[in-house]
Image: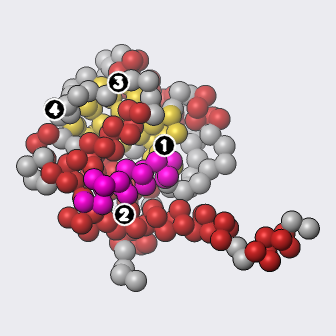
Amino acid sequence: MRPNLFWYATSELSQDAMLWWFLSWADKKQKSEDPNIHKVGIAFIDSIYEKTSIKAPSIYESIEIRQQDGGIDILCIVNGDTAIIIEDKVGTKQHSEQLPRYKEYVSKLKFPADKILSIYLQTRDQSDYREVEKHGYMVYERQTLLKVLESVAGNAACEKSDILSSYTCYLRKIENDVQSFRKLPWFLVAFRGR
């Protein structure tokens, strides 16, 4: 199997960088650079909007990515009037009242509540999201991201980008490992049932 950067770059900061890069492709200016990656970048942002009750704009005129602004992992400003807060997790959980603090910070930037999308993106596994949901964050799991990355647009983009292809393979391996219990031999399943 071909070496994959994401087997080694497993930290949250590495994933932050990947997501910053990925989101930046949704900007209208990137369409001429690579239409395939641009299209799947848009699909990623569309999938974020689908998690909320806020309607996505018909065109993403501008995408501004702010790194660690106010301590927020990823703050994505869409068309200058909508803020997407992404709290990115790689197997860890929220802590230190960070979730309400981030929403408060963004509201002080003069974004009205109906123009703030709060996303909790977890690419590993977490057993309980009640605390996340209590603070008004929408849970965005690995399976949802894989649907975007493994779509027709995602596959076309992966053909053009080793970065995107490697990240997709990395997430797919995690998902396959988590789901591997479904492929236990029948006699082990029968034995466990006793």
Q: Please name the residue that numbered disc 3 is placed on.
A: 55
* The N terminus: image quadrant: bottom left
Mark 3 to mark 1: distance in Å? 17 Å
State whether residue 169 appears in this view. yes
Q: What is the three-letter code of the residue carrying label 2?
A: Tyr
Q: How is the image coloured?
A: secondary structure
Q: Name the residue: 45% across, 34% down.
A: 51
Q: Amino acid at mark 3?
A: Lys
Q: Is residue 120 above or below residue 82?
A: below
Query: Which SS class for mark 1?
Result: strand
Task: Give whichever of 105, 131 is nearer the camera.
Answer: 131
Q: Position of residue 71 (x, y in %)?
A: 40, 39
Up-down relation of residue 112 to residue 139 (above or below): above
Q: Amino acid at mark 1?
A: Tyr
Q: Which residues are magenta?
A: 141-156
Specify the quadrant of the image occupied by residue 163.
Answer: bottom left
Dot in front, 4 or 3: 3
Q: Is residue 116 magenta?
A: no
Instruction: Give the Cα separation between the discs numbered 1 and 2.
Output: 16 Å
Q: Indicate which disc residue 69 carries.
A: none
